[in-house]
Amino acid sequence: MDAFALVLLGGLIAVVLWVWLLGRYYPGTGMEQLGLRSAREITETREALEAEDLDQMIAARNARRRARGEPEVSASEYELRVAGDIHEHNRRREQYVADRELDQLLEATNAQRRKRGLPERTREQAREEFGGGPPAES
């Protein structure tokens, strides 16, 4: 083997060894050295900031409530209120979908009844027949 090739091979081995030793014994991680953070650190920081924001918002809201002479509200009471609002939203959405399905069913049924010369069925008749409960608010 030629001397030049040996010098290049030795230099390459030295660089690889130096990089390996640097990575092995240098404190911290490569991400820290580049100023980057892991996804877990980013998520934990975001959650901590959101919790701090929530505490500050509740404290400000309670300060206004105290100034008006109203009782303070805790985070758990806000959570219960939000859960109730979500439940009510879902109930209304389900009622809307059920009404739309009933309208579509009545439209198809009444088209067939008209072809046969029978009187059309009303919403109230369909609700009584299928036990749909009280009529929906329009």
Image (cartoon, rainbow, N blue to C red):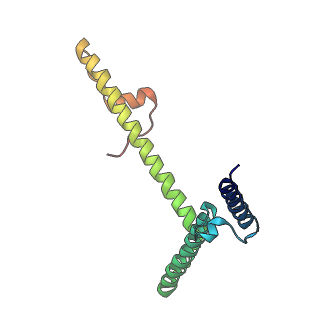
Percent of width and height locating residue 103: 33, 32
State the residue at coordinates (48%, 83%): 64
Q: Say which of 19 and 87 sits in front.
A: 19
State the residue at coordinates (40%, 31%): 127
Looking at the rendered image, the quarter that the C terminus falls into is top left
Percent of width and height locating residue 21: 75, 65
Residue 117, can we see it? no
Percent of width and height locating residue 110: 28, 22
Q: Say which of 16 and 54 sits in front.
A: 16
Quarter of the rendering containing residue 54: bottom right
Q: Residue furthest bottom?
A: 67
State the residue at coordinates (43%, 47%): 92
Q: Is residue 100 above or below residue 74?
A: above
Quarter of the rendering containing residue 113: top left
Residue 82, can we see it? yes
Q: Is residue 5 left or right of residue 63?
A: right
How many numbered discs, if any? 0
Quarter of the rendering containing residue 49: bottom right
Percent of width and height locating residue 126: 38, 28
Q: Say which of 135 and 71 sits in front.
A: 71
Q: Residue furthest top?
A: 116
Q: Is residue 127 above or below residue 25?
A: above
Q: Residue furthest front?
A: 2
